[in-house]
Image: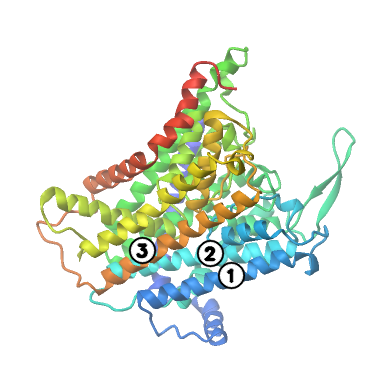
C-alpha cells in the first residue's frame, strides 16, 4: 500500500461526499414537488408524459396500489425485453446479423435487467444487437434504477407523514426520478465519457492494424451512453464482455475515477435526501456515515490483501512490491481496483474493472461479503436506502429490548406487525443465496459449469447466487452460467431478491405512514449519533456473520489458509 494509493481513494470518496450532499438536497426538492432549476425545461415534458400515459400526479396511492403499479410496470418491462431478444433476428440495427437469443438466456437476461441486477451470462459484443442494447437494456437501466428511487421515496414519505393513508404516486415518482435525476446526470457523464475516449457509434465493428502489423476486427457501438447510466443507475451490465476492464468501456485512470464517482453518487445522495424529507439532516448523515464506513474499511482490507501478494508467487522470485496483479489492469493499479471492487459490490452495481476470481482469498471474500450484507452499503439507487432503513428498524427494535421501552424510529412506534414484515424481508436473501448454492453444489448440473474444484469452486457458486439474489450482477468468473440450470435458477433468485423483498418493505411503509408521528422524548433512543451508528453497524455485521460464516468458512476462508500453506496458484 502506498500514500499515492490512499490519496486516490480518499480523493474519490471526498468528491462523492460533496456531490452527494448537494444532489440529495436537490432530489428532496424534486420529490417534495418544489420548483427546481430544471422545472422550466422539464416541466412541460413531465406534463406531456402524464397526459399521454393517463396518470394524474395529484392522485396519490396507498401502499397496495403503489406496489401493484410498480409490479405491473416491471412485468410489462420483462415481457417487452424478453420479446426484443427473442425477435432480435428480424429487428433493425443489427449490423453483426445476430439471431434470436435462446429462451433460457432471454428469460435470465430480461429478469436481470428488470431487477437492476444486470447479470450477463453472455458476451454482449457477440450476442446482442445495437437495437436490443439501446431499446432494451439502456431503457431498463433507466427505469429499473428509477423504480428503486421511487420506492425509497415512498418509504421516506412514510416516516415523514403522520396518520396518512397514502405514500405518493408511483407513476409520478418514476417519471421524476428519470427526468429530473437520472437523465440529466447521464447526459453529462456520457459526454464526459466520450471526451475521455469511449466509443459512441452505430457501427458494429472497426478494422485495425496492431503494432505487430496484424489485422484485427474490434467490436464497437453506442458504448458511452450505456456506460453512463450503467454506473449512475448501479446497473453494471457492460456493452462488452470484459465490462469496465475493457479499454473501450474504461479507457484510462480518469475514466475509472469518473466511473467510481458515478456509481456512488446517486446512492450516496439518498441518505441526504432522506434527511431533508424527514426534516432532520442528522438522520441522513448517520445513515451515510454507516454506508461509507463499510466502503472505506472494505477497500482497506482488499487493498492490503492484494498489495501483500501471494506467497507461492513470491517463492518463485517474483517481486513482492508489485502485489497481486493477476486479473487487474495496470492503468488502474491496486488502489483503484480495490475501491472499484468494494464500491461495485457494496452497491448493487456489478460493474468490474478486474476479475474478482483472481483476487487473493481475503481480497475476494470482501466483495462477496459486501453483497451478502444486503446491498445496503450504500446499495443500489434507492434499494440501498430502503434496505438500510429496514435494518435500522430492526436496530431500534433491539435497542428498545435492551432498555425495556417500546421502540420507535423518527417518531413512529415499531410494533409486532412491522417486525414480522422486517424479518420476512430480511430472510429472503439468505434463503435464496444459501438454498440455491447448496443445491448447485450437490447436483451435476451445478458442478459441470465449474472451472475450479474445492474451496474456490464453492466460492464461484456462492458468489453467483449472492450476486443474483443481491441484484448485484458481478461475476466471480470461472463459472459458466449460460446453462439451463443457472439461467433458470439465477433468474428466480434475482426475482426473489428484488420483488419478494420490496412487497414486505412497502407493507412496512404503509403501516408506518398510518401511524401518528410522535415527538422525541427524553426516553427516546437517539438515532443520529455515534451510538446508533455503532449499533447499526453491529447489527449488519452480526446478521451477515450468523447467516453466511459457515458457507464462507468452506470457501474463501479455507482458501486463504491454503494460500498461506503454499497451495494457492
Q: Nearer the viewer, residue 508 or 302?
A: 508
**Total tally of numbered discs in the picture:** 3
Report if the CB atoms under discs 2 and 3 are less than 8 Å apart: no
Q: Is residue 34 visible?
A: no
- Counting from the top left corner in percent of width and height, residue 120 is at 63, 51
The residue at which mark 2 appears reads as 144
* 3D distance between C-alphas at marks 1 and 3: 22 Å
Residue beneath the point at 65% across and 47% down: 243
Count residues near mark 3 (Cα–Cα under 10 Å), then give few for <14, some for 14-19, many for 20+. many
- Counting from the top left corner in percent of width and height, residue 34 is at 39, 76
- Element at label 3: helix
The residue at which mark 3 appears reads as 505
* 3D distance between C-alphas at marks 1 and 2: 9 Å
The reply, left or right, for residue 279 in relation to residue 303 is: left
- Counting from the top left corner in percent of width and height, residue 349 is at 53, 51
Q: In which quadrant of the rendered image does the C terminus lie?
A: top right
The residue at which mark 1 appears reads as 77
Q: Earlier in the sequence, mark 1 or mark 3?
A: 1
- Element at label 1: helix
Report if the CB atoms under discs 1 and 2 are less than 8 Å apart: yes
Is 156 situated above or below 289?
below
Rendered image: mark on residue 151: none
| Foreground label between 1 and 2 | 1
Q: Nearer the viewer, residue 360 or 201?
A: 360
Amino acid at each position: 500500500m502506498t500514500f499515492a494509493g490512499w490519496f486516490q481513494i480518499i480523493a474519490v470518496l471526498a468528491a462523492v461526499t460533496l456531490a452527494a450532499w448537494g444532489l440529495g438536497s436537490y432530489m428532496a426538492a424534486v420529490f417534495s414537488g418544489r420548483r427546481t432549476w430544471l422545472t422550466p425545461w422539464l416541466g412541460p415534458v413531465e406534463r406531456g408524459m402524464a397526459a399521454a400515459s393517463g396518470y394524474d400526479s395529484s392522485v396519490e396511492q396507498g401502499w397496495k396500489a403503489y406496489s401493484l403499479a410498480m409490479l405491473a410496470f416491471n412485468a410489462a418491462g420483462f415481457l417487452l425485453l424478453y420479446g426484443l431478444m427473442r425477435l432480435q433476428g428480424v429487428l433493425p440495427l443489427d449490423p453483426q446479423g445476430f439471431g434470436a437469443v435462446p429462451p433460457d438466456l432471454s428469460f435470465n437476461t430480461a429478469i436481470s435487467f428488470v431487477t437492476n441486477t444486470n447479470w450477463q451470462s453472455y458476451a454482449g459484443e457477440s450476442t446482442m444487437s445495437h437495437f436490443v442494447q439501446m431499446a432494451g437494456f439502456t431503457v431498463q437501466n433507466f427505469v429499473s434504477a428509477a423504480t428503486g428511487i421511487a420506492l425509497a421515496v415512498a418509504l421516506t414519505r412514510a416516516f415523514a407523514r403522520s396518520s396518512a393513508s397514502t405514500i405518493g404516486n408511483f407513476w409520478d415518482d418514476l417519471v421524476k426520478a428519470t427526468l429530473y435525476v437520472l437523465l440529466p446526470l447521464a447526459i453529462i457523464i456520457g459526454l464526459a465519457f466520450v471526451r475521455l475516449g469511449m466509443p459512441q457509434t452505430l457501427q458494429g465493428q472497426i478494422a485495425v492494424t496492431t503494432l505487430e502489423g496484424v489485422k484485427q476486427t474490434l467490436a464497437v457501438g453506442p458504448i458511452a451512453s450505456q456506460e453512463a447510466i450503467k454506473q449512475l443507475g448501479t446497473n453494471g451490465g457492460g456493452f462488452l464482455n470484459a465490462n469496465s476492464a475493457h479499454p473501450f468501456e474504461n479507457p484510462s485512470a480518469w475514466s475509472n475515477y469518473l466511473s467510481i464517482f458515478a456509481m456512488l453518487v446517486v446512492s450516496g445522495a439518498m441518505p441526504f435526501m432522506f434527511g431533508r424529507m424527514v426534516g432532520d439532516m442528522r438522520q441522513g448523515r448517520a445513515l451515510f456515515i454507516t454506508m461509507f464506513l463499510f466502503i472505506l474499511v472494505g477497500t482497506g482490507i482488499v487493498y492490503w490483501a492484494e498489495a501483500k501478494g501471494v506467497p507461492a508467487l513470491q517463492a518463485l522470485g517474483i517481486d513482492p512490491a508489485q502485489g497481486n496483479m493477476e486479473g487487474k489492469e495496470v492503468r488502474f493499479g491496486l488502489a483503484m481496483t480495490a475501491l472499484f471492487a468494494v464500491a461495485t459490490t457494496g452497491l448493487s452495481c456489478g460493474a468490474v474493472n478486474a476479475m474478482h476470481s483472481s483476487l487473493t482469498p481475503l481480497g475476494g471474500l470482501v466483495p462477496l461479503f459486501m453483497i451478502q450484507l444486503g446491498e445496503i452499503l450504500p446499495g443500489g439507487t434507492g434499494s440501498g436506502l430502503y434496505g438500510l432503513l429496514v435494518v435500522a428498524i430492526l436496530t431500534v427494535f433491539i435497542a428498545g429490548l435492551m432498555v425495556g421501552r417500546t421502540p420507535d424510529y423518527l417518531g413512529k412506534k415499531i410494533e409486532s406487525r412491522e417486525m414480522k414484515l422486517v424479518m420476512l424481508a430480511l430472510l429472503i436473501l439468505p434463503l435464496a443465496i444459501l438454498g440455491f448454492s447448496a443445491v448447485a453444489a450437490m447436483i451435476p448440473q451445478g458442478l459441470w459449469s465449474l472451472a475450479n474444484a474445492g474451496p474456490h469452486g464453492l466460492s464461484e457458486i456462492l458468489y453467483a447466487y449472492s450476486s443474483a439474489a443481491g441484484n448485484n450482477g458481478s461475476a466471480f468468473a470461472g463459472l459458466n452460467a449460460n446453462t439451463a440450470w443457472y439461467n433458470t435458477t439465477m433468474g428466480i433468485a434475482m426475482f426473489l431478491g428484488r420483488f419478494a423483498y420490496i412487497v414486505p418493505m412497502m407493507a412496512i411503509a404503509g403501516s408506518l405512514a398510518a401511524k401518528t408521528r410522535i415527538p422525541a422524548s427524553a426516553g427516546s433512543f437517539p438515532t443520529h449519533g455515534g451510538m446508533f451508528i455503532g449499533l447499526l453497524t453491529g447489527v449488519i455485521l452480526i446478521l451477515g456473520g450468523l447467516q453466511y460464516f459457515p458457507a464462507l468458512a468452506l470457501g474463501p476462508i479455507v482458501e486463504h489458509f491454503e494460500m498461506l500453506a503454499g497451495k494457492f496458484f
